[in-house]
Image: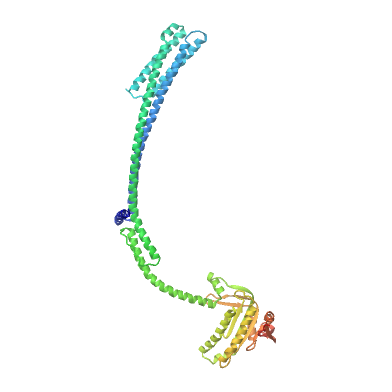
Amino acid sequence: MWEQSKKESRQSNLIVRIVAKAALSVRSKLLVALLGITLLLLGLALFAMAALQESNKRVDAMIHDQERIAYFNEIHLALSELNLMNLSLIIDQTPGGGSDEIFTFSSGAFTGQIENLQHHIAQGIRRFVQAGSKEARTIDVIRTELSDIKTKAVAMLRFRKDGYMQNVVELGLDQIFRRIRSLQDDAYTLVQSAEKEMSNRAIRNTEVYQSTRKMVVIAAAIAMGSALFLGYAISSSLIWPMRRIGQTLSVVAKGDFSARVNVPNRDELGKLANDVNATSERLGNLYETVEAQRAELEAEYIRSEKLLYNLLPEDIAARLKVDPNQTIADKLPNVAILFADVVDFTPRASNLPPEEVVGFLNTIFRVFDELADKHGLEKIKTIGDAYMVAAGMPSPVGDPVRRIADMALDVQRVVADMSTDFPDGLQVRIGLHAGPAVAGVIGNQKLFYDVWGETVNTASRMESHGEPGKIQVTGAVREKLQADYEFEPRAVVEVKGIGAVETWFLTGAKAKI
């Protein structure tokens, strides 16, 4: 079975390949398929229509037979009624009183019934009786007899009115009864003959219907099979290469640009296959170039990201990524600010080459950066030899004043340790203050995250009005830290732009008991 299936598949593929190699466009192939299927269906429709017309003729013939039977039955029933009426006349033929009235009335109805029957027979002769047939001869006999009976019935009616009863008796109502009875039998024979013809026609119609149905089914099967085969051959010659092209494109989409498609079509699909192969080759070349560029872009992106996070806090950078055009401006209810400045940096820098100046500041500020990371603080900026760091921004933190104080004490300690590494020694002034402030991003090219407000200005003045090697703080800072830290009072300091400010020196943390 498997070998037979493979053989049929090869034969099918052979037919499909032959159709595919035809030098016709896809549109032409589809039009050929459509035309072929249309002609097959049209032929089937014409055959079915002819069979239907023949069936309609047979149905019409049976309907005609039924009408003939009804026609003959009506004649038979009318004759039966005449017989009953004639019997009534026989019973009421004795003259006198009311009997005369009944006889007169019945005789008139009797002749009227004969006239109606004659009219009915005349109407149906052309439609239901074939000239020269046995039925035609029987109908002629009935018509002749009815005319004679009518004549006698009219004569009897006239004699009865004139009082010639003997003449009525001589005409013989009983003879009329027997003649009508004979005509009734003839009419019944016509009914039986018509019913037999109808039965035979029904049998023939059944046989013809069965034969016609088989022929229609066979014709339909041949037409549908041919249409399916033609549709399969045409559609497969299009779908098969399209499937191969699609499979190749799927492989290419997965990154294998060495994939190629080969189809025998000499139509648009063949051109499409060639285009796919050329595109795959070009994509392979482009992919190599793009991969090299992607690696460079990825490295550049990493550098850009690193630079962005060095310039801006992580939260602020993330917000700008979402909407680069938004305005970053935050109100900070509670931040602590630290300013640190290298003492006598200006005269020291004037005697050193630029490289040593930068190296000197870089050595110090790198240590400050490490301490800021240690205490979870945000480095704001450096201005010359001044270093600024904040706690509680851009996101609030727990106890920002304590964090900034610990940072100041660590700076004081490491600077003291580093002073031995420099010939002229090393000292810094440090100033602290805490309170509300406003922070945001300035610029649209060289972005800069900064903080403003009286809190910032006061912290800056604490540093600039401080003493070398000391940490000067405001009363607000001392109030929050005095329970756990040691302070040394300092006289009231006149601060430019602020006025008289009572300050203290932070000397260290209290020893834990």
Q: Is residue 123 left or right of residue 513?
A: left
| Pick the front one: 154 or 507 | 507
- Point out the residue furthest to the front here: 1
Residue 77 screen position, x and y as percent: 43, 21
Residue 310 screen position, x and y as percent: 53, 78
Find residue 366 and report its image quarter.
bottom right
Going 44% across and 10% down the picture, which residue do you hit? 158
- Residue 22 appears in the figure: no
Find residue 204 and report its image quarter.
top left
Q: Is residue 371 left or right of residue 79?
A: right
Residue 363 screen position, x and y as percent: 54, 86
Residue 281 screen position, x and y as percent: 35, 67
Quadrant showing the C terminus: bottom right
Find residue 71 and report its image quarter.
top left
| Pick the front one: 459 or 133 | 133
Q: Is residue 368 left or right of residue 256?
A: right
Q: Is residue 505 above or below residue 105?
A: below
Q: How is the image coloured?
A: rainbow
Count of numbered circles on the image: 0
Q: Is residue 104 above or below residue 268?
A: above
Going 35% across and 46% down the picture, which residue do you hit? 224
- Residue 170 appears in the figure: yes
Q: Is residue 346 above or below residue 11?
A: below
